Amino acid sequence: MSGPVTAAADLRRLVVRDLRRELRVLDGLIVNTALPVIIMILFVYVFGGAITTGSSGLDYIDFVVPAVLLMSGGYGAALTAVTISDEMTGGMIDRFRTLPISAWVVPAGHIVASVLRNVASSAIALAAALLLGFRPNATLSDWLLVLALVTAYVLALSTLAALWGLLVKSSQAAGAFSFVVLFTPYLSDGIVPAETMPAVLRAFAANQPLTPIIDTMRALLLDQPMGSAGLVAVAWLAGTVVVGLPIAALLFRRRTAA
């Protein structure tokens, strides 16, 4: 069993390895850079003129930016499932099994690399929003809290992606997770106001995890009342990470034990 210092060094090496690999894949790098900008332009110029923001009274760009920030980081985080699945079935894990590293380090390395990479994607989306006319009035502390929320969201989603990648047996099945992540924001209060949805969808949107996260980010960025959304958002994110990380380590250990 490696000690904490050795495990931390192993984790750092795996994170650097994952980031370098991503930088070498040109098409993936282009997607990670261009997708946030494309999503922002699509919502502001294509959908923005046709969607009203209901009782919030916000301009559509102000309304939709929090959801787009999460979508931009979340889509890349969901692809962690494919990366892990490929390694589980492609022979790389056999090499790791011969090394004296802790079982949790390999999935944790993918998760940490995903957080660093996809928070950057959210930052690109924010830059695009500012160029398109988004004008938040957040304070420095508000911005820090928004950064913490985006980071925690990407961390939670990367953890779930790691779990899914360890559960399924093929990269094709692992890729299904990204579609779920990409379309879930549409069934929240992020793209259109939940109050405009039919009753069943409105109930789902009001009680799914993304809605309190988006509402909290919107309150921080636009100086609006937050209510209980912040506490609910933190509970969802913290619970996902605290429960998911140990399960991911356990699944990895079991799949590599044979």
Image (spheres, grey):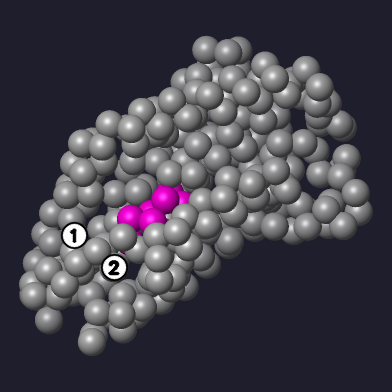
Residue under label 1: 11
Tell me if I can see residue 225 in this picture: yes
Q: In this view, does 25 lie above or below 97?
A: above
Residue 47 at x, y percent in the picture: 73, 24
State which quadrant residue 241 falls in.
bottom left
Q: Which of marks 1 and 2 is nearer the N terminus?
A: 1
Q: Check residue 93 in the rendering and tell me which mark sits there, or answer none.
A: none
Residues at marks 1 and 2, CA–CA distance in whole angstroms: 21 Å
Q: Which amino acid does label 1 sit on?
A: Leu
> Taking 123 as reference, is 200 left or right?
right
Residue at the image position 64 percent from the left and 56 percent from the top: 209
Q: Is residue 208 magenta?
A: no
Using the rendered view, name the quadrant where residue 155 is placed.
Answer: bottom left
Q: Is mark 1 on a helix, strand or loop?
A: helix
Q: Residue at x 28, y 68 (%)?
A: 88
State whether residue 25 is above or below residue 234: above
Residue 215 on image: x %, y %: 68, 42
Within-10-Å neighbours for mark 1: few <14, some 14–19, many 20+: many
Quadrant of the snapshot with the N terminus: bottom left
Chief secondary structure of the magenta span? Answer: helix
Q: What stretch is highlighted in magenta?
A: 77-84
The residue that label 2 is drawn on is 89
